Every structure is written in structure tokens, then in C-alpha cells.
């Protein structure tokens, strides 16, 4: 039974990871935070013709987002700026130590490569190759629910939704909400 | 005084202090943030300062999905905590008790060991996991209770990054029984942002504000169908409607609930779901006040504010039904059942009878009650289901660590810097978690 659950999880992880891998090499990553947020979703959409699947995937990925995920180079520049500030006593103190300076140089170097995401680290760890009795991150995933019933809530107003948008798969409850959906939300997570 | 630093390095909050004390010295966000108007990144407690306006602040976190991915950033945050908050003059004279996520990756363990021994020069290190520390703390609180007598419990940790159901036996976490649900407080806040941004105002960049909204206004429904009906009603009959006022950056830099009494009205709902808050004297007084107030402020669109109704319970609902969100994962009750079933049948009854809830996301009102209602039908009739919430679900892990750090054999359990230098990360790690 365990292997069945972890299989479901593994395939999910790999799926998301694929989308994220492509994101790393995507030039859009360097853009401002608002624009960047769209990038992985666009990449995901390009990778597949299935908008509904991609929209669902992108939505889940967005739930783990921070708003300043990829601004690696910038923080180091700003660290330096904050060293001059009187409030930042600890930084000033540390900047006096030469060790800190070499570390900062190293950090600056590292910063040019954005840190790898956790899902990338999981892939590198090659956990699938562990013998089946060894507990691992992948095997601890709870797995799919035993009941396939899913309640649907209108993405516009939140009430029980009986209709599905044919283009993006999102739910709505009535014509009023459908209009709002079409005008403002449709395919939002895809493009 | 003990010279053990106890550090619960959570994805949302860092809890840091000195072993043997009851309270951690510092409880600060494990992130750096840069306000819109500033070039400077604020660290940890600086984000809590009343003068900092965090509207649309950029955020960066060293942890992703609960695991350390950015040691450089983590070093800056720890360094700030050690030097200005604890304070810790010389780590080479101290030991570190560090709480690590379950089933950590060896590559991440290696970078943590480097941080601890090479960057900070700690004298020795002990790595603990949160379920065993929570278990230890609860067992010590009631030495004659079931958890203590059987040395067994099922710890459900619903934190910032994820949720774990973890069986603990003979005071050790049984890793082979651990089940993880990939939902925690961070995803719930992001989900709330999404709903409010769709329906009212764009709050996609307002993590701190929406954390506050979630913590103050969300609750767990005991009957979703009924509550959705109530949330459709207009005016006073809608017991869930309330208004949150966003900071304007001029008169107030923090958001607030427009009418706190209005926001509490859902507690009046009768369904045998008497909230413990209502049984207190204070609760009864509040009810009376509610009865008297008639004019409820309407949502004022000239102000920066938004109304909430069904979002208040639809958001925490995801912990119980991740499938509603499109996640292919079982909800919390099934997660617990699977963790129990992975253990020896001999342990099943005692695990169900000693479920301990910890983690900030268990603080939603009626969380334990809902969980019990969902769990009961899934558990054999002859077993009791008993769920206790930790007195302080945010600090419970840290307090367990503080207790362990003050035990006489603590030093003997640690890996010293000399051992690390001789044996390397991987071999030292074998000493922890049996
Ligand atoms: Zn609707
Ligand atoms: Zn659509």
C-alpha cells in the first residue's frame, strides 16, 4: 500500500519540478516581482497543451510562493547598503572581521546562482534508489485520499459551484459569477 | 546557567533561547523583508518593529517547503539572533540543540553541520525532531498520564510549511510511520490572499497583513454545508461577515478588524459546538454586548478595507480536504489513520488515545473538535479517540528542547566539533535518531 501512495506523490513532485527546472533557465526570472510571478505559469502552459491540468498545477505551486523568490543578487547589494546604517550594529560588527568579508565575497559568488529549490534537492538526493524499508521524504507523503469525491467551490464567490469553465477548468456557481470569471480570472494561472 | 542554545528553526518563525528556561528569548520570523519604501532588508525582529511599514514588502526565506535551501541567508538571520537578541558572545563555549524537519536530506544536513561547526564554531551539536520534543514536554507535564506511562503518542504538527502525523514510541519518533500532508500555514495564507484578491482588493503582496487576517478571523467549520448557507445571508443574519481595514501608511501602519464584536458573532452558532471561549465569564459578557449592538458598520469603499464571509472557514477547510484545492492528498484525519496503520497493531489503541496537536495552524478555533468528528468514524469502535492541543502550540517544540537541553545526559548525546572534524557530517549524524 505504501508504494502506491508514494508513487502518486513522486509523480506529482516530478511534474512540478519539471516546470520549475524550466523556470530556472527562463530569462523572465530576472524581471520585476509582479511580472516574474506569471513566468512559471507561462512556462508551464507552454510545456503542455492541457490548460486545465496546467492551471491546476500552477495554482498549487503558487501556494508555496514568496513574493521575492528569485532576487538573489539584489540582497547582497542591499546587505552592503545596510552596513552603513547605524541601526544595523550586528552587520557593522561583522563587516569588521575579515572572515566575514571573505564569506561575503563567497556569498556574492553563490548568489549569482539562485539557490536550488527544495524539489531540485530532492531529485538530486535520488531517494528512489533507497531500499524499500528505509523511510524517506518521498515515502512519508500521505498519498491520495481514499474517496475521490471533491467538493467544488466557486472561484468567484466561494459558494458551492456546479459549473466548470471549459477553457481553464475553474469553477463557478452562476451566470453572474461566470461573467466575472471570464472577464477577470479565466486562464489567470495559465497566462 | 546552562550554556545550551535551543533553536527551533521553523519555516515561518525561529524560536531561540537558552536551555532550561521556560520561554524562548526570541520568537522572530525566519525571513528577511524589504519594505517598499526602503533599500534595506530587515531581519527577524526588525520586521516586528512598530515603526516598520511592511505594506507590499518583499520577502525572502531560507527554507522552502520546510527544508533549508539557502544557508547563506540562514547564516545572516542566525547571526543577527545570536549577536543582538540572545545574546551569545562566544558560540565555541556553547552547545546547540537544533530542531530539524523530519526525514531531512543528507545534503541539507551537511550544509547545516557546516553552518553550526564551521561558520559559528559551536562546541557541540544535538539534532532533534519536533515530535519527540513535543512528546517529551507533554510527558513531563503529566508524569502519571497515558503519554508518560506508555511512552507513546501520536504527534500531529501542523505548522507553517507542512503537516506531519508522527508516531512516537519509547520517546523516539518512528520515522517509518510518519505521514506528511503538503499543506501548512504558508499555503493557507496564500490561499486567503488569492480569494481576497479575486473578490475585493489585491493583497497578493501582503503576506504579513494576510497572516494577521488569517490568525484573527479564520476558524474551522463544524458543518460546511450549513455554514455556506449562513454565509449567503445578508445583513445581521450573516454571522460570518466582518470587515478588515488595511493600513493606510499614514494613521496606521498595521491592519485591524473594524468591529471585533461583529467578527466574534459566529461563536453564537448552536450545534453542540460550544466554543470553550464562550464558557468563560468574559465570553458571556461579550455575548451580551453583541446583543445590544445593532448598527453594524458597512464596508466603506472609500477606505481601504475588505469584507470576509465564507473565506473565514473555507481557508482552514483545506487541511481537512486538500482535494477541494485540487491536491491529490488525503486530509488530516486520513493522514493520522495512515500514520497509525504503519505501526504495530499493538500500538494502535494507545496512539489514538494520545493524539497531541502542535504547530501554529492548530490554533484555528474548533480545529481539534472538527478533527475528532472526522477521525472518530475512521477508527475502530473499541478504540478511544483522545485529542489534546498543546497549551502553546507555537512554543511547544522549543519548550521540549529546553527541557531536553537541561537534562543531565544532554552533553553525552551531542556530537562535538572535534568529532565532526574527525568523522565528517554523515557519520556524526548516525548518532541522532537511533
Ligand atoms: Zn459564484
Ligand atoms: Zn476559465
Image (tube, coloured by chain):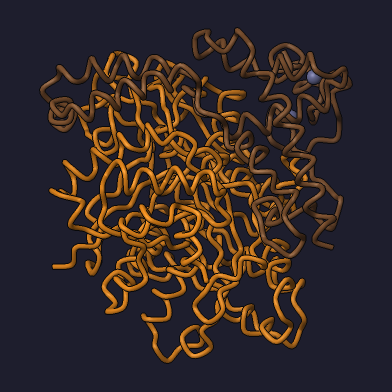
Chain colours: A brown, B orange
- Residue B130, image x, y percentages: 47, 62
- Where is residue A110? Give x, y as percent: 43, 23
Q: Which residue is drawn at 57% across and 13% down?
A: A29
**Viewed as shown, does residue B215 lie left or right of A81?**
right
Residue at the spot x=35%, y=40% of the render? B29
Q: Ligand 1, what quadrant?
A: top right
Query: Does B221 appear above or below B174?
Result: above
Residue reaching furthest to the left: A86
Horizontal side, residue B251 vs residue A12: left or right: left
Examine the image and state in which quarter residue A91 appears.
top left
Depth check, front residue: A168 or A178:
A168
Residue at 27%, 37% (x, y): give it: B48
| The N terminus of chain A lies in quadrant | bottom right
Q: Position of residue B205 (x, y in %)?
A: 47, 23
Quick one: B115 or A34, which is closer to the camera? B115
Q: What is the quadrant of the C terminus of chain A in the image?
A: top right
**Of residues B138 and B255, which is closer to you in this image?**
B138
Labels in figure, total = 0
Seen at 29% across and 41% down, the residue is B119
Q: Is residue B413 above or below residue B41?
A: below
Horizontal arrangement in the rendering, residue B102 relative to residue B119 (left or right): right
Q: Which of B366 and A23 is in front in this view?
A: A23
Amino acid at each position: 500500500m505504501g508504494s502506491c501512495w508514494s508513487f502518486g506523490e513522486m509523480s506529482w513532485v516530478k511534474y512540478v519540478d519539471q516546470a520549475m527546472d524550466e523556470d530556472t533557465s527562463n530569462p523572465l526570472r530576472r524581471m520585476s516581482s509582479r511580472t516574474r510571478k506569471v513566468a512559471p505559469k507561462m512556462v508551464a502552459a507552454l510545456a503542455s497543451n492541457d490548460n486545465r491540468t496546467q492551471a491546476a498545477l500552477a495554482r498549487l505551486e503558487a501556494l508555496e510562493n514568496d513574493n521575492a523568490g528569485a532576487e538573489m543578487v539584489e540582497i547582497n547589494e542591499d546587505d552592503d547598503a545596510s552596513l552603513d546604517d547605524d541601526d544595523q550594529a550586528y552587520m557593522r560588527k561583522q563587516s569588521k572581521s575579515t572572515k566575514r568579508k571573505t564569506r561575503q565575497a563567497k556569498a556574492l559568488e553563490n548568489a549569482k546562482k539562485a539557490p536550488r529549490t527544495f524539489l531540485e534537492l530532492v531529485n538530486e538526493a535520488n531517494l528512489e534508489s533507497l531500499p524499500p524499508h528505509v523511510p524517506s521524504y518521498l515515502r512519508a507523503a500521505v498519498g491520495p485520499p481514499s474517496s475521490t469525491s471533491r467538493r467544488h467551490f466557486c472561484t468567484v464567490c466561494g459558494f458551492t459551484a456546479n459549473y466548470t469553465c471549459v477553457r481553464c477548468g475553474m469553477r463557478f456557481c452562476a451566470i453572474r459569477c461566470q461573467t466575472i470569471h471570464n472577464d477577470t480570472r479565466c486562464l489567470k494561472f495559465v497566462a | 546557567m546552562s550554556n545550551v542554545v535551543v533553536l527551533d528553526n521553523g519555516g515561518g518563525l525561529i524560536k531561540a533561547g537558552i536551555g532550561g528556561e521556560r520561554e524562548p528569548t526570541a520568537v522572530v520570523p525566519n525571513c528577511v523583508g524589504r519594505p517598499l519604501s526602503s533599500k534595506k532588508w530587515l531581519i527577524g525582529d526588525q520586521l516586528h518593529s512598530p515603526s516598520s511599514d511592511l505594506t507590499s514588502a518583499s520577502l525572502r526565506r531560507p527554507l522552502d517547503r520546510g527544508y533549508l535551501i539557502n544557508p547563506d541567508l540562514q547564516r545572516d538571520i542566525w547571526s543577527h539572533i545570536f549577536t543582538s537578541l540572545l545574546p551569545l558572545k562566544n558560540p565555541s563555549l556553547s552547545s546547540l540543540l537544533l530542531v530539524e524537519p523530519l526525514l531531512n536530506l543528507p545534503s541539507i544536513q551537511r550544509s547545516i553541520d557546516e553552518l553550526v561547526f564551521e561558520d559559528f564554531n559551536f562546541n557541540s551539536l544535538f539534532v532533534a525532531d519536533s515530535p519527540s520534543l513535543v512528546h517529551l514536554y507533554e510527558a513531563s507535564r503529566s508524569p502519571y498520564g497515558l503519554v508518560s506511562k506508555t511512552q507513546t503518542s501520536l504527534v500531529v504538527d501542523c505548522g507553517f510549511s507542512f503537516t506531519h502525523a508522527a508516531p512516537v514510541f519509547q520517546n523516539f519518533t518512528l520515522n517509518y510511520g510518519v505521514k506528511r500532508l503538503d499543506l501548512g500555514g504558508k499555503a493557507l495564507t496564500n490561499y486567503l490572499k488569492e480569494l481576497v484578491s479575486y473578490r475585493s482588493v489585491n493583497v497578493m503582496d501582503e503576506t504579513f497583513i494576510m497572516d494577521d487576517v488569517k490568525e484573527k478571523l479564520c476558524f474551522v467549520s463544524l458543518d460546511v454545508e450549513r455554514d455556506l448557507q449562513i454565509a449567503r445571508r445578508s445583513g445581521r443574519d450573516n454571522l460570518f461577515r466582518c470587515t478588515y481595514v488595511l493600513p493606510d501608511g499614514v494613521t496606521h501602519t498595521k491592519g485591524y478588524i473594524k468591529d471585533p464584536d461583529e467578527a466574534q458573532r459566529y461563536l453564537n452558532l448552536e450545534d453542540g459546538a460550544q466554543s470553550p471561549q464562550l464558557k468563560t465569564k468574559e465570553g458571556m459578557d461579550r455575548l451580551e454586548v453583541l446583543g445590544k449592538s445593532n448598527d453594524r458598520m458597512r464596508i466603506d469603499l472609500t477606505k481601504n478595507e475588505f469584507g470576509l464571509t465564507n473565506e473565514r472557514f473555507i481557508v482552514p477547510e483545506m487541511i481537512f480536504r486538500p482535494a477541494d484545492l485540487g491536491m491529490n492528498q488525503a486530509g488530516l484525519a486520513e493522514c493520522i489513520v495512515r500514520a497509525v496503520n504503519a505501526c504495530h497493531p499493538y500500538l494502535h489503541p494507545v496512539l489514538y488515545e494520545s493524539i497531541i496537536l502542535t504547530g501554529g495552524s492548530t490554533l484555528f478555533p474548533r480545529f481539534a473538535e472538527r478533527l475528532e468528528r472526522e477521525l472518530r468514524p475512521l477508527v475502530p469502535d473499541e478504540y478511544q479517540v483522545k485529542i489534546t492541543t498543546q497549551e502553546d502550540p507555537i512554543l511547544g517544540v522549543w519548550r521540549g528542547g529546553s527541557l531536553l537541553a537541561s537534562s543531565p545526559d544532554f552533553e553525552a548525546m551531542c556530537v562535538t566539533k572535534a568529532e565532526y572534524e574527525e568523522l565528517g557530517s554523515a557519520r556524526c549524524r548516525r548518532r541522532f535518531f537511533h
